[in-house]
Image: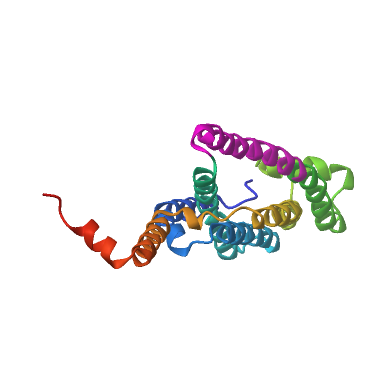
Amino acid sequence: MQPWPASTTFPEDLAEQRVAFSWGGLISKIKHVHWQLTFAIAVQTLFTALQSIYRPGQVAKLLVFQLFANAPFAWITLSCYITASLHVPQEDLGWALGLIGTFRFLGSAVGTTVFSTILSNWAFSSTNSRVASAVVPMGYPADKVSSLVSAIAHDTTRFLDLSSEILSKATEGYRLGWADAFRITWLATIPFGIIVCGLAIFVQDTSPYFTNHTAMQLEKEAGLEQKETPKHIRRSLSRPER
């Protein structure tokens, strides 16, 4: 039995693709890249943690949380690459961009390991506890609960001599056990998000290095120099050579 709705991958893919397609041109319009980075991480942290209130059957709620939790991913990635591209000297740019990619994959590997461990450990205990509390009061032997949980997980309950009522209660308890495990896993992401939000605040803003800002600054400086130049010198400089 699949404890998590398969359809939840759709909003994740949609959010990442749409933001990656449209947000690149908006970063330079909004400016203040360090605040954009902080806000994007905060949104991702908030909606990832809000998935902890999901209960079996509340698919619409989960889809919305998945959408907003994954939408900032491309936004964060683009902001990091833009920040490195405009702050790091050209001779070190290859190293900087390579390190961003390395730490992205390293963080993904570490995060997958940590959260998978939390999920599997809690799922084992919570599913057994939930199923036991659901079926033992109905007369099901407590020493057979673990085998019942295994049968539900591998969809082999048809080989067990179970009444429809016990099977229904056991299945509901199994789903609630997985919901408890996912809740703990989502809540465990909060400290990491808070730490990264705090670090993002201290990232140097790259807005002054955007092309439009630099061009305007050069134009202002050129106009200022022209005003400071005496009028007779400007007139002689503007005369064409013969």
Report x, y in % for residue 172.
71, 57
Looking at this view, name the residue that lies furthest to the left. 242
**Residue found 35% across the figure and 67% down from its top:** 227
Residue 114 magenta:
yes
Report x, y in % for residue 220.
39, 64
Looking at this view, name the residue that lies furthest to the front. 232
* 241 to the left or right of 221: left
Report x, y in % for residue 78.
49, 49
Give the tally of numbered discs: 0
Magenta part of the chain: 89-118
Camera-side residue of 135 and 210: 210
Name the dominant secondary structure of the magenta segment. helix
Q: Is residue 178 visible from the viewing direction of this image?
A: no
Above or below 204: residue 225: below
* 118 to the left or right of 241: right
Residue 190 magenta:
no
**Residue found 70% across the figure and 45% down from its top:** 152
**Residue found 28% across the figure and 61% down from its top:** 233
Above or below 111: residue 9: below
Q: Is residue 129 visible from the viewing direction of this image?
A: yes
* 170 to the left or right of 90: right
Q: Quadrant of residue 225?
A: bottom left
Report x, y in % for residue 54.
67, 62
Above or below 106: residue 232: below
Camera-side residue of 190 and 128: 190
How has the structure been colored for display? Answer: rainbow
